[in-house]
Amino acid sequence: MRIARSVILCLCASLAVLPIHSAPVPASAKSLQIYFVDVEGGQSTLIITPSGQSLLIDTGWPGYEGRDADRIVAAAHQAGLKQLDYVLITHYHRDHVGGVAQLVDGIKVGTFVDHGPNLEDSEVTRTDYAAYEKAIAGHAHVVVKPGWGLPMKGVEVQVLSAAGDLITSPQPGAGVANQYCAKEPAAADDNTENARSVGIMLTYGHFRFLDLGDLTKKKELQLACPNNLLGTVDLFLMTHHGADLSNPKALVWTLHPRVAIIDNGPRKGASPAAWQIVNDSPGLEDLWQLHYAAGSDKDHNVADERIANVKENCEGKYLKVSAETDGSFTVANSRTGAEKTYAAK
């Protein structure tokens, strides 16, 4: 895994101040684990490696009596964790960064990772970024750039996008011409924090998981056109909660995801247009949702057994993925107990 020397130096200096001791691996944990925590239309994705290291991507909303932080901590405890080694903030919108202050009150955090200062000219985002800076004071902190990686044992976590910049060289095995680009409409500029999202590719043996945060179409298309810089993936977290401001066909279809997950809320994300693009993508075996999309229709929601929460006022059930180095993986629904295994290919 390529890790920029400056990142290593920064991490070493930070860890000298705030040591990280990875949680011991529970005896039953032999796979990579990914929890898609329900934070009601925000993002919070908890990754635990077989060695016991942990990475949380985003922290959900503030307020609600600590609802989102409590759900994250509950998932961490379910996974046998006593602390979070890394917390990566994709961007500074409230549904991604808002839960940080409550999270650090509920569980120990080692290092915060982000794209650097807020780049959006809006009062609410400046306010949320200031709250984030205050909450992480005293913690180790790393600013990443495209092409850098996180030093996690047994897996590769590659940064693809950050602060509006993108990788320019293809991932291993990628770089071929993308046949879907010719018919893709031009995308508009986006000056919000969405377009500055930190996007990552996680690789565990033959298993590949893509999370682009809330990256919007113009940036997504720069990763996919005219050549596909990302290759194919096994698991795709639909960008931007399944919003149609993201998830262009030329990106999604060239990825050939085997399984896609939508971290939508009951009335946020999972737009019919984006849902249909992913549902129709070549090679897709299944689509799973964190919520029934009440603002959509029956034809643009998956079957009940693949939805973690079906009511608007829900208990916050999660979806869990367990992946093996051969590329096989299992998706489980904590609400129903339903699970499905996708064999190695």
Image (cartoon, grey):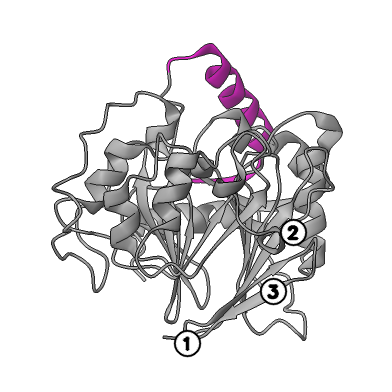
Determine whether the residue tagged by mark 2 lies in a helix, strand or loop. strand
Residue highlighted by disc 3: 339
How many residues crowd mark 2 within 10 Å: few (<14), some (14–19), many (20+)?
many
Magenta stretch encompasses residue 124: yes
For marks 1 and 3, give the CA distance. Answer: 19 Å
The amino acid type of the residue labelled 1 equals: Asp
Span colored in magenta = 121-143
User: Is residue 323 among the parts visible in the rendering?
Assistant: no
Residue 10 vs 122, above or below: the answer is: below
Residue highlighted by disc 2: 83
Among the 4 quarters of the image, the one containing residue 205: bottom left
Q: Residue at x 46, y 27 (%)?
A: 118
Magenta segment main secondary structure: helix
Residue highlighted by disc 1: 326
Determine whether the residue tagged by mark 1 lies in a helix, strand or loop. loop
Among the 4 quarters of the image, the one containing residue 7: bottom left
Residue 305 vs 180, above or below: the answer is: below
Q: Which quarter of the image is occupied by the N terminus?
A: bottom left
Residue 323, position in %: x, y?
57, 77
The amino acid type of the residue labelled 2 equals: Gln
Q: Residue at x 53, y 18 (%)?
A: 126
For marks 2 and 1, give the CA distance. Answer: 28 Å
The amino acid type of the residue labelled 3 equals: Glu
Q: In front of the other: label 1 or label 3?
A: 3
Left or right of 208? Residue 248 is left
Among the 4 quarters of the image, the one containing residue 165: top left
Q: Residue at x 28, y 60 (%)?
A: 254
> Which mark is drawn over residue 62?
none
Is there a contact, CB below 8 Å, between mark 2 and mark 3? Answer: no
Which sits in the foreground, 297 or 24?
297
